[in-house]
Amino acid sequence: MSESTDSPSANATFEQIGEVLRSNQSFVLLSHVRPDGDAIGSQLALGFSLLAMGKSVRMINEDGLPENLAFLPGSERIETPPAEPLDVEVAIALDTATKPRLGEAALHAASRAKLWLNIDHHISNPKYGHYNLIDATSPATGEILYDLITALDLPLPPETRDAIYVAVSTDTGSFQYPSTTARTYEMAADLVRRGLDVGTINSQTYDENPFRRLELMRALLNTLERSPDGIVAHWEMREQTRLDLALRPEDSEGLIDVIRAIRGVQVAVFFEDLPDGKVRVSMRSKDRELDVCKIAMEFGGGGHALAAGIRMKGPLEEAKQHVLTAIRKRVEETRKHS
Ligand code: 5GP
Ligand code: MN
């Protein structure tokens, strides 16, 4: 399963990507189901740069624009997939670890594209594009796009500037996770110099929680459990809670950080009933040795060493048992090695 260095689909250079962007006229930009700030932010960032180059651009997401990201300038351009395939030359997948995570309707909408670009920062990405730009050391796809846009001297309009900032801020827990580097702060400084309004954009990103999100947190706290050694903490959201509180998919985004932040906890897990009967598992680790991406991959999921997820078969109780057992196994193994 490991990424081999002699992979036939090595990364493209910025110049190769630039050539594809310059020499084609029509693009569809895609990101993963249940999009987060990095997914939508990446679409808007590259989308508005291409629009400023005079290109024809559609920005499609299987689940559309989440309410909490509607403050992003230009976000009204994010559409749910049209029923008929789009007449476009190039499809660009952003922030999406595997092609199926783009969603069936979105894939259908993009099915006429002759050329696929795949730009992402997930280590588990199998490089499914004709041209791939996968940098697992980058904290967000938004930062890869910043590097690409500035290196190629592509347009960086205000929509792109704000979208990059929100993409990186949300994927780094407000510039806090260890993936944040000096380059990340330099990028942020450059965006501020380009006119980004830090106070306003942060308050739009973080100080606009709908009340039901806090009600959800209260419900989650009532399910909180911790392993006897204090290493694993988990909580869960049942279907009834979703119905009672009239929750939207984005309402649970980021709440897992609350249990990740418990002293002594190395792995935090969030189990959630999905409307389709499947179970979504969200995992966070504080220790690279306890690689949650590897655990997610055992169940067909993926992500990063410190943040990963799965969509798996329900019911929740069973999914929980399987995943917690796999985590326990990893914890014991890691202990043996250290
Ligand atoms: P989150 O817990 O925030 O939903 O996701 C954490 C990370 O794991 C993200 O980078 C996300 O893209 C990835 N991830 C979440 N769910 C899945 C999944 O079902 N499959 C794969 N391959 N990756 C996932
Ligand atoms: Mn991301």
Image (tube, rainbow, N blue to C red):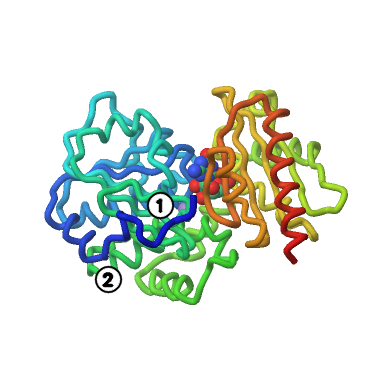
**Residue 102 in the figure: left or right of residue 243:** left
**Residue 325 in the figure: left or right of residue 89:** right
Q: Nearer the viewer, mark 2 or mark 1?
A: 2
**Residue 24 in the figure: left or right of residue 231:** left
Identified at 83% across, 53% down, the residue is: 230
Dot 1 amino acid type:
Gly
Residue 60 screen position, x and y as percent: 33, 38
- Where does label 1 land, which residue? 41
**Residue 173 in the figure: left or right of residue 126:** right
Furthest-right residue in this view = 228
- Up/down of 148 relative to 183, above or below: above
Q: Secondary structure under badge 1? A: helix
Reading the chain from its start, which is encountered first: label 2 or label 1? 1
Identified at 76% across, 48% down, the residue is: 233
Mark 2 neighbour class, 10 Å CA radius: few under 14, some 14 to 19, many 20 or more: few
Mark 1 neighbour class, 10 Å CA radius: few under 14, some 14 to 19, many 20 or more: many
Residue 105 screen position, x and y as percent: 35, 28
- Where does label 2 land, which residue? 151
